[in-house]
């Protein structure tokens, strides 16, 4: 009878100092983070990124964050005012191959 009692699952988990599951044993090693520990930095970075634009602040306001307490955003110039769109040189008139061949055709006729 004593041999049958020592093989029961309840007797193995009642040993002091031993974790009752493999998950607890892995967590006690210290190398595995909880999901909340992994998500928390990403959540904070996303919130900080949303605070930097007017559109992001409107998203935060819809989610219930107090965005009226944040400092006012600096005035940004539109990208077309400070980015050079062309190099200034005109495009050739006969860019297509038919336009280039037409003068040659006239010379041969």
Image (tube, grey):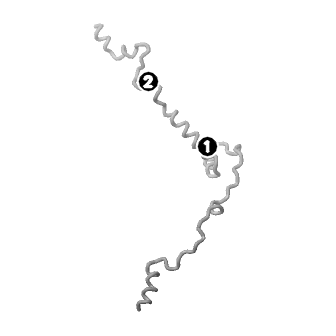
**Quarter of the picture holding the N terminus:** top left
Q: Is residue 106 above or below residue 41?
A: below
* Quadrant of the rendered image containing residue 48: top right
Q: Secondary structure at mark 2?
A: helix
**Between marks 2 and 1, how big is the CA–CA gap?**
34 Å
Where in the figure is residue 8, as x and y percent of width and height? Answer: 32, 15
Mark 2 or mark 1: whose residue is earlier in sequence = 2
Tag 2 residue: 24
Q: Is residue 68 above or below residue 6?
A: below
Where in the figure is residue 99, as x and y percent of width and height? Answer: 46, 81
Q: Crowding near pointer 2: few (<14 within 10 Å), some, many (20+)?
A: few
Q: Is residue 23 above or below residue 13?
A: below
Is residue 97 or residue 55 the one in the foreground?
A: 97
In the picture, measured across the screen, residue 108 lies left or right of residue 51, that is: left
* Quadrant of the rendered image containing residue 23: top left
Tag 1 residue: 48
């Amino acid at each position: 009878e004593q041999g049958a009692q020592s093989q029961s699952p309840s007797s193995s988990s009642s040993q002091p100092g031993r974790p009752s599951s493999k998950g607890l044993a892995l967590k006690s090693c210290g190398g595995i983070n909880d999901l909340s520990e992994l998500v928390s930095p990403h959540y904070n970075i996303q919130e900080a990124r949303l605070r930097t634009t007017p559109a992001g602040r409107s998203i935060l306001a819809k989610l219930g964050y107090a965005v009226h307490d944040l400092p006012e955003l600096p005035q940004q110039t539109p990208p077309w005012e400070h980015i050079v769109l062309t190099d200034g040189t005109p495009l050739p008139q006969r860019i297509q191959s038919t336009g280039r061949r037409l003068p040659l055709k006239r010379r041969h006729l």
